[in-house]
Amino acid sequence: MRSADLANDILQETWLRLARGGSAGVLRSPEAYLFRMALNVAANERESQKRRLAYSEVDPLMKFEDDELDPERFAAARSEIGALAQALDELPPRRRAIFMMARIDGLPHREIGERTGLSVRMVDRELRKALAHCGQRLDRKVVRIFGPRELEE
């Protein structure tokens, strides 16, 4: 079981099940009956553990503020993600690909240019247009990465 505590819990649960009521199988082969019962308890425990969240899954949730867990905010975020997906679908394929490489994959403009056969300046121009389009569709003010100025198309 990889854990003495878990093995002890399974042994205790097996003992409790045995104490609740016997079976004809106990009389024929007590060792095999107890072994099978312990295996069943262990299998049940393993399944139960799979349904529980690990600490690493729960810990980030504990760091959210109460208002961040608000169902209304989740619904609004889902709606905004849908609007962004729609805005991206409206972009020409090359512009969408550049946007995805820059914003999702985090590639530098130079590498995007090498992959697409475009100059860094052209990659920058396409990315600006993609950001301006998405900003307009989401009714958001788009600012430059390195400064507070709005992007103009």
Image: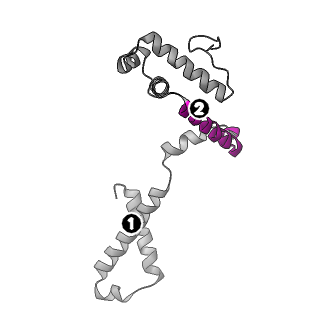
Q: Which residue is mark 2?
A: 87
Give the quadrant of residue 21.
bottom left
Q: Find the distance from the CA under tag 2 to the CA under tag 1.
A: 48 Å
Image position, residue 54 (x, y; %): 48, 48
State the residue at coordinates (34%, 59%): 1
Quadrant placement of the C terminus: top right
How dense is the environment of label 2, judged by Cα within 10 Å: few (below 14), some, or many (20 and up)? some
For residue 114: magenta? no
State the residue at coordinates (71%, 39%): 67
Residue 87 or residue 92, whichever sits in front: 92
Residues drawn in magenta: 67-90
Magenta span: helix, strand or loop, mainly? helix
First along the sequence among labels 2 and 1: 1
Left or right of 91, for residue 46: left
Image position, residue 25 (x, y; %): 34, 86
Q: Which residue is mark 1?
A: 43
How dense is the environment of label 1, judged by Cα within 10 Å: few (below 14), some, or many (20 and up)? few
Image position, residue 44 (x, y; %): 43, 67
Disc 2 to disc 1: CB gap under 8 Å = no
Left or right of 132, for residue 23: left
Q: Residue furthest front?
A: 92
